[in-house]
Image (cartoon, rainbow, N blue to C red):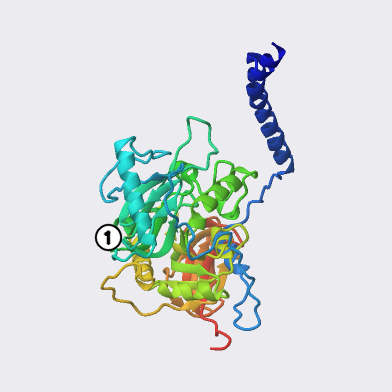
Amino acid sequence: MLFERLQKPSRRILLISLVIPWLSAPVLAETDSAKASKKSEVLIAELAEDESVEDVEQSAPLQTKGKDNKARKPEAPQGGVGIDTPSAGSRKVAPNIDLKQVAPPPEAQVSAPADTDADAAESEVMATEAVAEPEPEPEVREGEVFTLLDNDVLPGTSTRLAWTPGIQIAGLSQTTPVLVVNGINAGPTLCLTGAVHGDELNGIEIIRQTMYDLHPEKLSGTVVGVPIVNLPGFQQGSRYLPDRRDLNRHFPGSPNGSLADRIAHSLFENVIRKCDMLVDIHTGSLKRTNLPQLRADMNNPDVAEFTRGFDRMAVVHSSGSAGMLRTAAVEAGIRTVTLEAGESHRIQQHQISAGVNSLTSLMERQGMISRMFVWGDPEPVYYDSDWIRADHGGILFSEIELGANVSEGEILGYVSDPITNAQHPIRSTTDGRVIGMAVDQVVMAGFAAYHIGTEAEVPGE
């Protein structure tokens, strides 16, 4: 009898063996997460001053010799960043959507239809996988599956995805639309971001017009567009986030920092790192306007070469500031420039057309599209620039227009004292071109009124 009982385990022993692992697993998980939370640090960055003034003034001078460019250490290889083959795991095949047609906004998680449709999608994905490997028979589709936000975008398709940083109240979170056009042919990945400052509207329209004009069956490579990065600021007509922080001072971000740190980290890790090239589109800050121009670190050879693909776009040398999306992306090995066009709170078609034209020329230069494109005369590169400031308080009245060429000593405008009727002229301190200026408004002494770009002599040229 005793031998038979030992041969047959009792029900109590079976129950205990099943319950003990079930109880111990969460306890261990909680212990590990608690240890991880103790090690994390809360990173809060200070609010920096206006980027359109300070980042240019603090730029390092151009150097062509003797500059030891720091080696960039991207976390992922640049050539294949963001390009992956589909798997049968948590990723889904993104639906093919004609972006030119009006459609409902994307959901946070785009789920593939069950059973039959899912099987058909899997078979199509398997056919795409075969393209990546050399086969005796040539395949028509030469593109690659582009994986973004847990979705596999097939070659020759376009779609709308959704990104959310996961920082809002559950049930009230709003997703940010992400447009993707994956070309039928292989090529680089270009990312376009707009409204990092929520009140800068021109970039939103530049991205819309550029993305909706693309044809995936004629595109080589992939274009990713995030028209409205700072959705809370956009909804409130504010440059900043709800916590009054400038999002463009917190990249690449931190998963455990401030609100701005967390949003920046989510965008950078989930979208930006998937790209080879980035154009971050901005406007002038409040009550300032900018001539269509690129802000680029011309000390970086890769970035300097990248700027040559933008037609009819002046280039202003700016090494950038810590925390800027452009600076963080370049450090991650992504060729990046900032495109400035116009002023905030406004839709300016002339500035928008200039931006769309420059992005079209960039894609043509990168071999992503093939179009009959007539290049204009090359715009100058302004390695030096100065802000001319008002010496008196009053009401600013400009005498010159954006883009005008000015001479040293020339009157740019007046500051009128409404009480004493005194007129105080503002004169240019150098020869150059007006690449940015304040709109007529009330100013105080020291206000940056005119941004003058000068074509400095480049060492070695």
Residue 309 x %, y %: 41, 73
Residue tagged 1: 217
- Residue pictured at 49% horizontal, 47% vertical: 230
Out of 173 and 35, give the one closest to the viewer: 35
Quick one: 239 or 419, which is closer to the camera?
239
Residue positioned 31% across, 66% down in the render? 136
Q: Which residue lies furthest to the top in this view?
A: 1
For this rendering, which residue is in front, 13 or 1?
Answer: 1
Is residue 48 visible in the rendered image? The answer is yes
Q: In this view, does 422 lie above or below 256?
A: below
Q: Which amino acid does label 1 sit on?
A: Glu
Q: Quadrant of residue 35?
A: top right
* Mark 1 crowdedness (10 Å alpha carbons): few <14, some 14-19, many ≥20: some
Tell me which corner region of the image, top left, top right, bottom left or bottom right, holds residue 117: top left
Q: In which quarter of the image is the N terminus?
A: top right
Is 382 placed above or below 41 here? below
Q: In which quarter of the image is residue 207?
A: bottom left
Identified at 42% across, 47% down, the residue is 151
Residue 343 visible? The answer is no
Left or right of residue 100, residue 266 in this image: right
Q: What element carries label 1?
A: helix
Where does residue 78 sit, x and y in percent of width and height? 51, 64
Q: How many marks?
A: 1
Residue 179, above or below 322 = above
Residue 162 placed where, x, y %? 42, 44
Position of residue 300 in the picture relative to residue 144 (left or right): right
Residue at the farthest bottom position: 461
Residue 158 at what x, y percent from top left?
32, 52
The residue lying at 43 percent from left, 58 percent from top is: 192
